[in-house]
Every structure is written in C-alpha cells, then in structure tokens.
Amino acid sequence: MILNMGPQHPSTHGVLRLLLEIEGENVVRIMPDLGFLHTGIEKTCEAKFYQQVVPLTDRIDYLCPMTNNLCYVLAVEKLLGLEIPPRAQWLRVMLNELTRINSHLVWLGTHAMDIGALTVFLYCFREREDVLRLFEMVSGQRMMTSYFRIGGVALEPPLGFFEKVKEFAGRFPARVDEYEDLLTHNPIWTMRTKGVARITAEDAVALGASGPTLRGSGVDFDLRRDMPYSSYEKFQFKVPVATEGDVFARYIIRVQELRESIALVRQALDGMPEGPTKADAPKVVLPDREKMKTQMEAMIYHFKIITEGFTVPAGEVYQAVESPRGEMGYYVVSDGTAKPYRVHMRSACLANLQTLPKMCEGRLIADVVAAIGSIDIVLGEIDR
Amino acid sequence: MPLGPAITDVAQLKSHPALARILAWKPAAVEAARYDRDELTLSIERSFIRDVCALLRDQAKCPFNFLSDLTCVDWYPSEPRFEVIYQLLSIPNRERVRLKVRLNGSSPVVESVTSVWPAANFFEREVFDLFGIRFSGHPYLRRIQMPEDWEGHPLRKDYPVEGYR
C-alpha cells in the first residue's frame, strides 16, 4: 500500500511530502517529494547587488539566520580579499553560537513533541525566547536578523547587550540539565530513540550527510575545528561524537553541542577585543551615520554603494560553515560587476534528507517520525 | 589578505594531491587548472568526469570521499554554455578541490556520478530541473523543485527573473 505523509503533516517540520510504501506497519520504501516551498532565491540573488543578497539569506533557513548571513558574507569577503577586524569576528562567533542554541532548542522541542514528550517544547521555547530577545536587541529583528554585513557587522551592539548575554550564559547550562532530566534517562524516550533509524558511517559519508547526522555515526568532523573560519581556531571547544548512529546518538550530540555553544559564547564574551566592527574599505562598507552627515567623502561613498553597489573582482569561491544542521556552503561566482553572477547554496538538509530512506526502510512507520526529527530538516533550506 | 594573482600553470600546481593523481592516471583528462583565492579548480574533459571522481574517491593518500556540492553555472550566450561544478572534500585530509565540466548549450549531457557518491542524486536532479542538463545513468532523473509539468528551466540566464507572463 502507498501511504501519503504530508505535505501538511505536523511531524514533517514544514511542507515535506513522503510517499511511504508500506506492508502492514512496516515501511518498504520511502520517496521524498520536495519543492513545495521553492521560492527561487538563487535566481533572485542574481538580480540584486551583493549587499542586497544578505536579507535573502536569512529567509533560506529561518531558524539559523546568522549562520546563513555569515556564510554568505564570508564568501563575498573572500572574493573581495577583505580583512575583517577582530572585534567583528568575535561578535560573529558569539552570535553564531547563540543562533546554534536557538536552532537546537527549536529542534529539541519539536522533535520531543513528535515523539510524544510535550513538556520539553514549553521549556525549550522559554530559553529560545531569551535568545530571540538578544537578537532583537542587537539587530532590531527577532528572526530575520541580517546583522552581519559584507565587511563586518551592521552596528556596534547596544549598551547593556554584553551584560544580557552574560546573564543568559550564566543561567543556560542549568536549563540544559532540565531538558536532560526530562529526556536522557526517560525510559519512554530511550525506547523510542535507541537503536532506531541507524545509519553507518560509510553510508552517511556516501550520502553526503553532515553535521550531527554525520557525527552521530562516528565520523569526527566539524568544519569549525577542522577548516576554521572567522577566528574559530582561536577558541577551545570539544566536538561531540557518538558511534551508534541512531536517533539517540544524534539527540545526545545536539544536547552536548548546546553546552559547547554556550561555553563558546562565554569565551567570546571574555576575550572580546576592542576596536572597530567594520573593515576599513570605504568603497564596500557603508560609512557611519554620523560621518555620512558631516563629511562629503563619506556621503559620496554612501550614495554610490546604495545606488550602484560595488564591483567585485571576477572569480569564484566556495565557502562552507558548520550550521546547526551540517555543512552550509555558498558558491558565489562573480563576473566583475556589482551583482553576483551566480549564488548557489549548498543545503545541509537536502543532503541529510537523502539518508532518510536508508534509515527507515524496513522499520515501523512510527520510526519515520523519529528519524525525520533526528535529522533536523528545515524545508526553507531544502527548497530555497 | 589582499588578493594574489591566480596561478593557472599546471606544472606549478601538480603537488596538489588531486591534480597529481589525475595527471598520473591520464594527463589528457585535465583541460586546465586554476588556483585562485586558496581554492583549486580543475577543468575536466567531459567524458572522463565519472572516472576522475571514482579515482579521487578511491586514492589512498588523500581520498576525496565526500561530495560537498554539485551545481551548475550558465554562461549564456557564450559557448560552451554550461559549467557543471563538483565540490569535493576529503574528510580525513581536510582538503577541498573543485572540478568543472564544460558543456555546450545545444544538448548538455554529462555522465552521472551517483554511482560514485549516492549523495549526487538530489543535487543532479536539482541541476536537471533548474538548468535542463541531462545526467546519463542517473537512477531517477525527474524534476525535484519545480512542478512536474513546468516548462523551461528557471536558473538559465535566458529565463526572466519574474518568469514568463
């Protein structure tokens, strides 16, 4: 029998449609059907100036906007050969880790809810609200932040921001303990997750899985540590790895990543360098508001960047960052004009989704729900 | 980090493990090489792409076991019009290389690499869907993002941004 799951199904985390060929309760074959959220962002990018693409990148993966911003601006900065001041890099790392916490909290809440643990959702969204308030404070937006800009960050963070972050970093580890109390040793949770939806390391690598989906199978690879960007090489952190390759392994890795991320936030706070938050490149970076109103030169640059953009030397780069879901990559091609010739996003979810049939075929329908939750998909990123 | 000039001389670059392996196997497979902004790009002759991918995946010293990305660029109206781009990653060696295949606009066909990396499945379907490039040997080459009955390939440069009205 063919069973249609989705596109409007609460446990597919968006508009994913799965065609399940079933025999009784057992799944014989899974055929994912995508594209319900296709918005043509890659095509839109080709019609925009380089700096106008930044707000589009938020909308690809609405749970980790800063990671997407970071990946895109790093790619363009690499094309331009721009040097970014340390303070901006530290800020980026700090906010990027807060984004990871935000994304993992949504994942944990919804994943637990799919399996039937409704309470966790309320706890997770309590802390997520705190992170979103920090985002609102620093960028004026809760979700579509667009805070990272080509050449630095949009503005110096407001007064009192670092104190707020410090306060949050102080109370968050205890909150992670609360989630773990609810789940890690809960017999119902372990029965639904341990040994479920296994995938081997060879299969995970061959199918292009990355992030916790890959590390859950025992492959010790994290782009932040192994191919560092934005000063990650100056931070100390552990990369959690588990070898079982099941839903529980992916769960425990993400929970540990929550702890590592908050430790990274604290390191960034402690070591935050003084100095400018924007690169010294007047043709690329918008001048400060104050300068723009008082200096002729700054006003001219501002006018030119807004009206005709800035040209980028011809070439191509591929920049990858470790997003909460895995390897998020931007391939940007420049033909020497002010608009990107091609922007392609390597979506971690699209590749991770390919592991789903391998995980679930031959297992129960209820395990499909657990498996989808465990690979943490965001349909906005899959369909773009 | 100011930009240095790109290196395009194959002889200067042959110390890179990927290029060295391909040159040892079949020098004719490499059309051009370019080292720019710390990234190596190798243009591969179209008929060899699947073999080159299998070769790079299986080499012992630096196995490029992970296909990061597969995409395409349309250089309309110049010929050869399409470039199919493969981003390879070696997880044990933390090394990247980009392969490139040039295809002409009239009948763009290239051999599928799904037999080398199953990961290429969705990526190739997406390129087929949005650029109209056929991958011979692909197990299920159907549209993935656009509806089944869609006409045209939206990411081609001669396709208007706002679509046909």
Image (cartoon, rainbow, N blue to C red):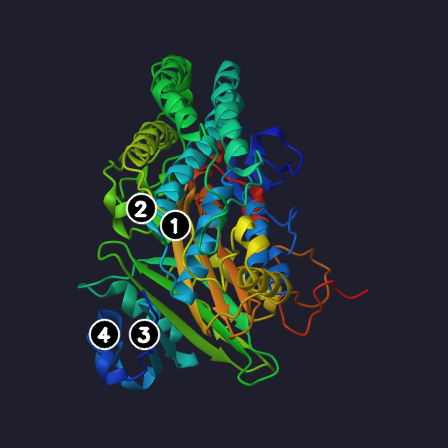
> Distance of mark 3 from mark 1, alpha carbons?
24 Å
Image coords of residue A367 (percent x, y): 47, 29
CA neighbours of label 4 inside 10 A, class few (<14), some (14 to 19), many (20+): some
Q: Nearer the viewer, mark 1 or mark 4?
A: 1
> Judging from the image, what secondary structure is the residue with disc 1 in?
strand
To which quarter of the image does residue B161 belong? bottom right
> Distance of mark 4 from mark 2, alpha carbons?
28 Å
Q: Nearer the viewer, mark 2 or mark 3?
A: 3
Front-most of A353 and A137?
A137
The answer to whether the residue labelled 4 contacts the one labelled 2, judged by CB atoms less than 8 Å apart, is no
The answer to whether the residue labelled 2 contacts the one labelled 1, judged by CB atoms less than 8 Å apart, is yes
Instruction: Kindly identify the amino acid type of the residue bearing the numbered disc 1.
Output: Val
Q: Are marks 2 and 3 on the same chain?
A: no
Give the chain letter at badge 4. B
Instruction: Kindly identify the amino acid type of the residue bearing the numbered disc 3.
Output: Gly
Q: Which residue is mark 2?
A: A224
Indicate which disc residue A321 carries: 1
The residue shown at (56%, 49%) is A289
Instruction: Kindly identify the amino acid type of the residue bearing the numbered disc 2.
Output: Arg
> Judging from the image, what secondary structure is the residue with disc 3 in?
loop
Give the chain letter at badge 2. A
Q: Are marks 4 and 3 on the same chain?
A: yes
Give the chain letter at badge 1. A
CA neighbours of label 3 inside 10 A, class few (<14), some (14 to 19), many (20+): few
> Distance of mark 2 from mark 3, alpha carbons?
25 Å
> Distance of mark 2 from mark 1, alpha carbons?
7 Å
The answer to whether the residue labelled 2 contacts the one labelled 3, judged by CB atoms less than 8 Å apart, is no
